[in-house]
Image (cartoon, coloured by chain):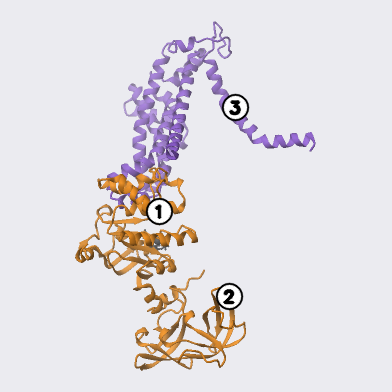
Chain colours: A purple, B orange
Amino acid sequence: MSPLARAGRWVRGHLVLGLGVLVLAYMFVPIAVVVLMSFNDPGKSKNVYAFRGFTLHNWEHPCGPAGMCHAVGLSVSIGLLATLVATIIGSMAAFGLVRHEFSGRGLANTIIFLPMASPEIVMGSSLLALFVSTGFGGRLGFWTIFVAHVMFCLSFVIVTVRARLAGLDDNLEQAAMDLYADERQTFWRVTFPLALPGILGAALLSFSLSFDDFIITNLNAGQTTTFPMFVWGAAQRGVPMQVNVIGTVMFVIAIAIVLGGELNNRRRARALVG
Amino acid sequence: MSQASEGSRSLHLSQVTKEFASFTAVDSLDLDVAHGSFFALLGPSGCGKTTTLRMVAGLETPTSGSIRIGDTDITYAKPYQRPVNTVFQSYALFPHLDVHENIAFGLRRRRSAEVDRQVKDMLDLVELDGQARKKPHQLSGGQQQRVALARALVNGPDVLLLDEPLGALDLKLRRAMQIELKRIQTEVGLTFVHVTHDQEEAMTMADTVAVMNAGVIEQMGAPAELYENPRTTFVANFLGQSNLIAGKVLGRDGDFVKVDMHGIAVSVPAQRAHTDGTEGWVGIRPEKVLIAEVGEDIDAPGNHLEGGIVTDVSFVGVSTQYLVRMPWGQELQVFEQNTGRRKIFAHGEKVDLSWRPEYAFLLDSSQDVNAGIEDD
Ligand SMILES: Nc1ncnc2c1ncn2[C@@H]1O[C@H](COP(=O)(O)OP(=O)(O)OP(=O)(O)O)[C@@H](O)[C@H]1O
Ligand SMILES: [Mg+2]
């Protein structure tokens, strides 16, 4: 075999691997930049997008920029609260849509897609109009943001949980009833544990949607500043390096949740073999 | 256990009807299943077998009629209030629970004592010891089937319902599981109601077989009785194969009924004649028909048919299966054992047929001669 042919074979054999690495790089380079910039020492420079020197200062003083940590705290509390409420209401709605025959079910199934399909700017401004016309115009802030976030998270929760429930074999519930479980036990012992991965997935999705929403939030926030609004505002003057610290922390938490779930699965699988 | 209490745990369905919208899936069904028996419900796809089981399990409510176990009416009882457990057609094992917890599920709901020991005994019975901590998806089809069986059996129900539990298994495993299931049933002594559309499975396993068709039971009895003395063309064709030949009833002669079959006088035992009309179908199983060279003396008094021509020969090892065209144009099936002492006829040869009168049966002419023939 000629060296050229051998090289050709090598390339063909590793083509998929190479492409895969490229795609991963495409996805992760921006994150790597965020992590790197969290250690950047901009000095007195106005150009905050250039790496000038290594420092731990940003990590030691994450709340340095005025108002940033307050904005982060606000975003986290709105995110948690909106996630909780949207997940509970949305999951119950999904159960209703999958398990009960009622007139208008087809229509309801279509309508829940609308908030996902309509542009955020439209939803945001119509919500603002609603708040103003019902007399909440002067009280825009935490609670109006919360209401807005629950609204747009709901669709995602319903769609995610519904897909999980639709994939469940309803023979399982009948089998539980056949094995002496009453309606309540059937729900808590069989239906709920099987739906749980879908519900948790919906909750994660809700939190991340809520945490970084800008358009709808901005329109309904009044004088309140969430983290995305803070970053947007700061970007006019030069983003403080601590924003990258917050970004890195969020990324690490997300990775930890995913890895934790994976490790849990592995551990259970190993317990089975042992 | 005393005779009285055994009798009080038998299953009775009376006049049970189930309608879906305007469609009647089960029509005025009467059924009595003795305690401790292996009962098979046999019928083609869509005849209402699953619907019947689901009504006994409480997963479907009858439109009318009543279901009892012993003296207790359970027609409208909730599924979890009945001493009945089901092995589902698709097994329906709980995917989030391991084998041990699947089997323990019913025991825990009833707060039974010594759950672990009972589960272990059950795993031994179905020969799955060592698999207790696996999840259902880590098991083979046959193993899943056994878990489904163990999960139902461990509760010691008065009646165990099995909905085509072997349907998803390949032929070899199916035969092995049939023997296994029969062994377990004998060992635990519970009432099994087994649904299947495999007639061989029903006949090899069950004490009593009920043949079901379009929501009604056509005939019920011991397998040999159903096979030898079918009452309807559906049973004659669905359970094995039959030759059904049109005939005119000439009248009764002692214990026999005389029938004119295209000019040939044949006789049928009176207790196997299931028609009062002047016409009927004379039925005979292919393996009961003897085939011989023209003019040969066959050991079969009466019922002698001449003028046949062999139109098809298939050699299947244990037997040779012929199709023989008779003078009136009908082709009859003849199965002959390969004893090695009889000649194997060739296509086109002229032959005589004969059968012993006691093997024949007579069915009502109003019934469809092709009912129950599976076209596959
Ligand atoms: N929920 C339902 N709604 C309407 N029709 C139904 C329903 N369940 C069953 N049927 C109908 O009732 C008839 C009997 O169904 P069933 O499931 O009892 O058949 P089966 O004998 O178990 O058939 P198979 O061997 O294919 O499992 C079928 O024609 C079926 O279409
Ligand atoms: Mg069925």
Residue B91 appears in the rendering: no
Q: Which residue is mark 3?
A: A25
Please state the chain letter of the residue tagged with numbered disc 2 in the rendered image: B
The kind of residue tagged 3 is: Ala
Pointer 2 and pointer 3 on the same chain: no
Chain of residue at mark 3: A
Residue A14 placement (x, y as % from top left): 67, 34
* Amino acid on which the number 1 mark rests in the picture: Arg
Number of on-image labels? 3
Q: Is residue B342 visible?
A: yes
Say which residue label 1 marks. B146
Q: Is mark 3 within 8 Å of ligand 1?
A: no
Q: Amino acid at mark 2?
A: Phe
Furthest toward the top, the residue is: A44
Q: Which mark is residue B315?
A: 2
Q: Chain of mark 1?
A: B
